[in-house]
Structure formats: structure tokens, C-alpha cells
Amino acid sequence: MKIAQLDDQVILLTPETYPRIPAWRLAARQGKVRCPVCGSHLSLMAGISADPRFLHPADSDCACKGSDDAVHERLAASPELAAAVAAAADPAPRDANPRQANAATVEEEDGESVRVGSFRLPKQRTIGGSSVTPAPKPPLFRKRLMPKTRIQHLAEQQNEPLHPRQQQAVTTTDGPLLILAGAGSGKTRVMTARTAHLIRDKGVPPRQIMVVTFTTKAADEIRQRLARQLPREQARELIAGTFHGIFYRMLLYHQPERWDQRRLLKKDWQKWRLLRESGLLASHPELLGQKEQDVLDAFGVISRWKNEYLLPGQSVSQEAANDAERQAHELYPLYEQAKRTLGWFDFDDMLIGCYEMLRDDAEILRRYQERITHVMIDEFQDINRIQYETVKLLAAPQNNLCVIGDDDQSIYGFRGSDPQYILGFTRDYPQAQTITLEVNYRSRSAIVGLGYSLIGHNRARWKKDCLSFHSEEGETYLFEPDDEEEQASRIVDEISHRIEQGTPPGECAILYRTSESARPILERLSEAGIPFHYTQEEDSFYQRQAVRWTLGYLRLAQDPDDAEALREILPTLYISQEMWNAVRSQAILEDLPILHVLPRLPQWKVYQRKHLQTVTDILAACRECPPAQALELIYEDGRLRDYLKKRAKDRDDGRERWSDELQQLLAAARRHATVAEFLHHVERMAEQEKEWRHARPLPKEGVHVLSIHRAKGLEFDHVFLPDLVEGALPHEYALDAVRKGESSALEEERRLLYVAITRARHSVAVGIPRERFGRKTRPSRFIAEMGG
Ligand SMILES: Nc1ncnc2c1ncn2[C@@H]1O[C@H](COP(=O)(O)OP(=O)(O)OP(=O)(O)O)[C@@H](O)[C@H]1O
């Protein structure tokens, strides 16, 4: 239903009033929105594809049955209410910032300021220093995003197991073959059919066929599909797996002592520890003093060099592009020496080890070349130099080498992958045949069109035509929520709507560029009781230092005797452990809340006492005000922001992550009316985060929340792409590179978005929050490139 009552007012959902949805959503959560007929609390559901509506609780037996006509009938009986409905149709919002409507119970207001306790907050002040522009254009609730290029669909839709081009790819088995396969064009189907054809029709023993996939899951999938078509033991004999898996098995066979997996360094911190303990850094005090994060970044660079087969001496000849590379130059030879001396190895060594073994031992190489007669490589666009060189050795001299890939989906540049190998394959193998698979069987045509329009802006690519198997357009939406929190609510409401319509939760996926985008969405999913799959990649948001300090202040505002909270924030007040003991003793002595005795200690210097008194007063004022305002007071008047800024500067931490964290907290706080309610929410979410780590719903039963990188090769009915704004996608680092005149990072970002869009079968919804981390955003440049 579209009509409801908020306090004594009638509210109406119309496109003109949609900008007020965030405020009404909050009011509904607080139980202030009611049904005009039965008076029960209503919730507000505002997804993306369907129009927003108010909902009765599941067990309601209201006479109106959610129908607006029944409400109108009821209202007709009351002229007062009927007049109120007419008034509600008037869209003029009462306040410039709809987010705050109904949210705050401030004590007093005048023209310029809001009074909170004895503090006066200028009305214009927003966190981050930017001021609110009066009456901004209301955000776009939703629109269809139509592709710039319309895609033809396959003229005759026969339900053949294979398209003639796919069939050609299956039966071309002699000599080098490049299969350029667009997104959703059936690579897995082709690879399986091709393997089956080799075994069944050409009589090639499965143990002579090597199939390399990007993940072990993909290799298992091929094996399982084969097992349905061939005797099970034949499927088992196939050499299938990832590069690491296959190469490691070869190394273990020939050099078992050298490659004992107990000596494998899996994590970068293990590498750093080995290096520190090796004693090799004794003569490099400058390296020993490095921050751990910088060292870990340098190990990332070293790994990329190793994948490019740049050995320590060779890497030095390259000019360092940034600090991480400079540091990597120093660390690389020492790290290699430490491993050699102590007998350890890392994942990259497996690739290098296998390559060098085959290159240097003619007998071993001959044996493998005789044994493996057919090689097939999936996701060839993401191959790196060391893998490619090894494959070339193994496939020779017959070169029955089939590589399958889509240069437009190359997204692992930071790991040394290079689309140049796929682009240059026909140069390396001039006799190679090329087959292009250009029918997208997965996505509906408008989705194919968006992806195709977007990727056409990349220069370094094979130009391909593209057809859609499906004639239906599918659904492609763009929506503009106020901020990241409202964006999360819209996505989760839409998922609830899809589930109501019968979609299994596992057919919905939220694909993000960086993990900050995930937190509000996970919280909303949790609140809505929708199961989800999420692999925690980062430390918990609520455990981060800046967040913990801020929450410490809020807790102290709630309870001035919360000694643990005060202890938490001591560093931000420049109070030492020694002084802390004095504060505690004084509180016991005077039998007063610990916060109240804080400014009264005689030891403080005058300026210190003044600041502590201000903090005490602020926290007293915060108790009564909405949490967003409380945070504003703490950040600004309590000078927490100044403290964090100074701390970051002292630590030479240019990343300013803390600033984004404060803003995220602020956006989250806006959804709550009181400090107590917000703290309760935080506690619940921190608790639930622990459960997220262990929860494992069945694949179909949980919504998938994952990074675009991890989504490669997967497909879902409905895909949600949050935060399509400049700085998020394309990522800030790519924009930096553009400013320096470098375009390859931007092209990789474009490929990332292309991968994300082409995961969808039926619908794609793109979110452009108006604000992110408290700052105004600009829509991603990719939006205009793909559609309008
Ligand atoms: N000839 C065909 N007829 C009908 N459906 C097909 C055909 N070929 C592939 N499909 C279907 O199209 C979808 C995409 O196939 P697949 O996952 O193999 O594509 P892909 O090329 O690996 O895609 P991507 O590179 O985007 O991950 C799958 O659901 C698959 O079953």
C-alpha cells in the first residue's frame, strides 16, 4: 500500500515523495508508521525494480489487506483524514535534508544553529568540512539503464547442445588454436565437449590430455561433467587442475625433498618473519625499521616480478615506479637468499621451479612432451609469463595447444597477468587457427549490450562482434540512493522482493570493487534475516582503532562510569597509564562517576583541564541527542578528528583510512534515533560478524556477497553493483595513473566492471550513492560509456 500514517500525518508514496523514503524508513523502524485502517505498525519496502510500498506485519489480518482502495474507503468516512491525504500528495519536503526528518530530537533550534546541551552546532556544518548545499536536486529513485549499443540476438534459436562455432572449436584438435570466447559464450561447455571428443572420437588416452583451469573448482566441474559422458575412471585419469596444482605435482615427483609442503610460505607475514629471523637484515637497519604494511606491499611487488620471471638482478634494472617497488628492490635479493639458505619456498617458486626443471633437464622435458599430447588452457587472458613459458615447453613440439580466453576479462594485472599474451598468441604461433565465440548464452540482451558498449572503450583488445542468444531484454537499472547505507537498504529490499517472487537467495549476488562496500550490505542482510555467503577478507570494521575509539566516547556518553570505555580512549586525550591510575583512585575516593572526576585532577595543566572539561560536557550533552549529532560533537568539539589526523601524520600514514571510517560510522549512526539504540546495533553487528565467518549456507540458500575478482567465471540471475562512483570503480589508484597520463590501470578497471556486469542472467542494478564516506560523489565515468 502507498498510504500510511506517520504520527498524526498522512504520508503517501509517490515519485515526488520518494526522496523522503530514508526518513520514513527510519520512522517505520521506530514504529511510528501505522496503517490508517487497523493502526498496526507498517514497514517500508523500497527496493529497485518494484515501486516502494508500506507493508503490514506478516501475521496481520487488517481489513484493508494492503490495498489502497480499502484505505481510501476508510478515509472517505473521515473528512479530516481525506484532507490530510490531499495535503500529503503535496511533495514539498519540510526540510532540506530528508535524512534528518523525524530522526533527531534536538532541544532547540534557531535560524542558524541547533542547540545540544550547552553546545551549539551550526546547521550548515557537516562532518568533513563541506557545507550542505541548499535544496539539492532530489536523487534519482530508479531508471532503466539502456545500453549505448543494441545487441542483435541469434536469428534462429535452436536448442542445439552446441552452436556451430562451438562445434568447430570442439573438433579442431590439431595444432595451436586460439579460442577467443566472449563472456557467457560457453567456454566450460566447449572445454568439456572438446576433451570428450578427444577421448571418445579421437582415441586419445585421458592421461595424455592436460587441462589447466584458473581454479580447482573449475577443474572439478569439468571432471564431473566428463564423468557424466565417459566411464568414470577415464574422467579421473585426465590431468586437470590449476597451474600451481599440476606443476607442484611434477616437482614433488622429481624433487620430493626440495618441495616438502611443510616448507611452503603461504602468507606474506611468514615471508617477512623468515627474513627477519634469517639474520640477513642485520646490515640493513633501514629495512628492519619499516612498517609491516609497507613490507607486505613490497612482497606483493616481488611476487609480481617473479611471475614475470624477473629475477633479482633483472628487476633492479627497472626503474622503481613507487615506494613499494623501491622497497621491493632492496628486499628481493635478501628474501631469495633467506629462502635458499633455510630451505623454504613460496607459491611463485613452484612456477619458477617447474619451468627451470623442464628447461634445464632435457630428459625430464622429453618424457613430459611424449606423455602430454594435448594441452588446453582456460582463462588464458590471465596467464603470466612464467606459466606461459612452461606451457610452451610442455606443448612442443606438436603444439596441440588450445588456449581459451577473453582478453576483455583479464583482471589480474596486479599479479603479473598480462593480456598481451592472448593478444600476441598468433604472433608466437603463426600457424595458429583462431575461432571466435561471440554468442552470449548467459545474459539477457540489454545486459550484453551494456557490457559490450562499455568494453568497446578499451583500446588494448581484440575487437569482437557480439550476439545475444536471448531475445528478451532483461532488466537493467540505475538507482541513486542518498548514501551507502540507503544503498544497502535498497539492495536488500530488492533481494527480499526477488525472494518473495520465488528467486532462490543464491541467485542474487552483490559484487563489490573494494570490501568497504560490503559492510552496510551485510548488516542489512543480517537485519532482514537473509542468509548469505561472505568470505571475510579484512579485519572487522568495528575492531578498527579509529572506530573503537569513537565507540568508546559514545559508550562513555551513555555511562559516565564506564571505566573500560574511558580507558579505551585515553590515548586520544593524551593521558598516560600513570595518570589513569590517579583518575581511577580519585573516582573511588569521591564516589563519583569516573568521567566526572576526570577534569578535576589537580595534576592537569590549564589547557589540558579545559579540554577534559569540554569533553565531559560534550559527552553529557551527547546522551540526549541523536547519535549522528553526538558523533559530530565528538569528532569536532571533542577534537577526535584532530587527534586522528595528527596521529596519521606522525605515522606517515598517507592512506587516511581513519577518515573514511569515521564517515562510515556517521552514515550508520544516521539510521538510529538514540545513542543507546546505535550502540546496541553496533554490539549486535559485532557479534554477528563472528557468525558470518563460520556460517556456511548451501550455495542456493544464501545471497552471494563477493568481490568482482572472486566472481570471475560465476553466474547469477540478479547482480547488484554498489558504489559505481569515481574513486571506487574506477578505483582511486587508476584515476591517479590517468592523471599521470597512464591508461592501462583504467582499462583494467573497465574490464573489472565488464566481468561484473556479464555475471548476470536476468537483471543488473547499479547503485550510485550521492554521498560516500560523507563526501559528495561523482558517477563513475563508465556509466556514460555503457548506457544512458
Ligand atoms: N550452446 C549452448 N546452448 C545453450 N546454453 C549454452 C550453450 N553454451 C553455453 N550455454 C550456457 O551459457 C552459460 C555460460 O556458459 P559458460 O559459463 O560456459 O560461459 P563462459 O564462456 O565460461 O563465461 P564467462 O567467461 O563469462 O565466465 C551457461 O549457463 C551455459 O550453460
Image (cartoon, rainbow, N blue to C red):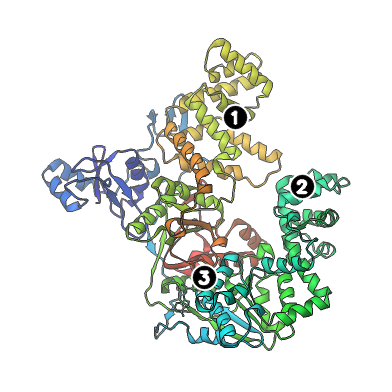
In-image side of 56 versus 374 (left or right):
left
Give the spatial CA distance, label 1 vs label 2.
30 Å
10 is higher (above) or lower (below) than 388: above
Depth check, mark 2 against mark 3: the one in front is 2
Depth check, mark 3 against mark 1: the one in front is 1
Residue 211 or 144: which is nearer the viewer?
211
Mark 1 is on which residue type? Answer: Glu
Crowding at dot 1, Cα within 10 Å, few <14 / some 14-19 / many 20+, comes out as some
User: Which residue is denoted by mark 1 in the rendering?
Assistant: 568
User: Which residue is denoted by mark 3 in the rendering?
Assistant: 454
Residue at the extreme right:
283
Badge 2 element: helix
Mark 3 is on which residue type? Answer: Leu
User: Which residue is denoted by mark 2 in the rendering?
Assistant: 273
Residue 36 or 438: which is nearer the viewer?
438
372 is higher (above) or lower (below) than 614: below
Mark 2 is on which residue type? Answer: Arg
- Can residue 126 be seen here? no
273 is higher (above) or lower (below) than 786: above
Badge 3 element: helix
Residue at 61% x, 14% y is 585
Residue at 43% x, 46% y is 526
| Residue 559 image offset from top left, x and y in percent | 49, 24
Query: Is there CB contact under 8 Å for labels 2 and 3?
Result: no
Give the spatial CA distance, label 2 vs label 3.
44 Å
